[in-house]
Image (spheres, rainbow, N blue to C red):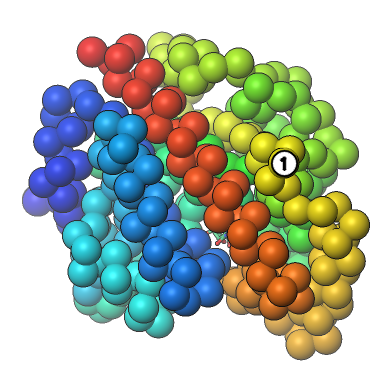
Amino acid sequence: MTSPILVSDAVAAALAEHRPVVALESTIISHGLPRPRNHEAALEFEQILLDAGVTPATIAVLDGVPRIGLDAEGVRRIAEEDLAKASVRDLPILAAAGASGATTVAATAHLAAKAGVRVFATGGLGGVHRGASTTFDESADLSTLAVTPITVVSAGVKSVLDIAATLERLETLSVPVVGYQTTIFPSFWLRESAFTLDWSADSAEQVAKIMRSQDELGHGQGIVVANPIPADQQWDPTEHDRVLTEALALADEAGVSGKAVTPFLLLKIVELSGGRSLEVNLDLARNNVRVAAQIATEWSALAR
Ligand code: PSU
Ligand code: MN
């Protein structure tokens, strides 16, 4: 059987030659950032990687085909078309129907790992939603990382989620969480949360060594690298708290549930903050892409 996953020539060549590759998700572009900034951001994330000598592998399902690495037209489509938000469970349905979808962290991680890509940069990881003890709303990002060998660089999880519960679930799922040059778990737009981590890595090289040890130990999980936004780029904490409370109340009033919750909150928060949260979101994502580039570079040096 031929692989149903289409790897671009650039990504295939980089993988074959053990050159660094970083996966990028498409849900953040399709559902997490407003148009037209989303298109600029998608291109910019790829350019940051190219400038660092790393091959970008933006991932999405286009016309039923999961693609690892998009051309300019593919990037345009994830930014401009109204694509389904696709988690892992949606992949076979889209494939059979010949339909398109923007892949979440879960679906991107799954497809990237299948193609042999080991490092992935995103903004924030999905997690356990507030109120999950009654709604059961926990992102498949967590359960997917329990069975997918990929290192995900994120700025932690948003404070719209239940951060404590998210960290507990990652522990249960045996997914290592490593702070990047910190032992304080970040909360996306803010450098810190109230939660500390047992472990930190001081360098990209150290993360690559953890990845190698993970392989040697036959540990098939992913690794969460929690990379805080630099202090001078974070959102003002007081305004952050005010906007968050308002956005959560609006989601409640509107009765938003399930997979619509994350996109709803993200776009409301951009609105309520007069665009400030968007700038912070872009800064932290760029920062994650840079760190992922360094990790992928160290990883390919180890693998050679
Ligand atoms: N966090 C962000 N921006 C995003 C998302 C998360 O800062 O766009 C997206 C990611 O694609 C993540 C998904 O995988 O939301 C999680 O959605 P849910 O909570 O429905 O699992
Ligand atoms: Mn959910």
Residue at mark 1: 232
Residue type at tag 1:
Asp
Q: x%, y% of residue 133?
A: 82, 60
Category of crowding for the residue at label 1, using alpha-carbon neighbours closer than 10 angstroms: few (below 14), some (14–19), many (at least 20):
few
Left or right of residue 10: residue 33: right
Where residue 88 sits, quadrant-wise, is bottom left
Q: Please report the residue visible at 40 percent of the width from the left and 64 percent of the height from the top.
A: 40
Q: Name above or below for residue 85 compared with residue 237.
A: below
Q: Please report the residue visible at 72 percent of the width from the left and 41 percent of the height from the top.
A: 232
Q: Please report the residue visible at 18 percent of the width from the left and 49 percent of the height from the top.
A: 7
Q: Name above or below for residue 214 compared with residue 269.
A: above
Q: Please report the residue visible at 54 percent of the width from the left and 67 percent of the height from the top.
A: 32
Q: Name above or below for residue 119 compared with residue 238.
A: above
Q: x%, y% of residue 97?
A: 26, 78
- In-front residue for pair 173/139: 139
Q: x%, y% of residue 289?
A: 46, 41
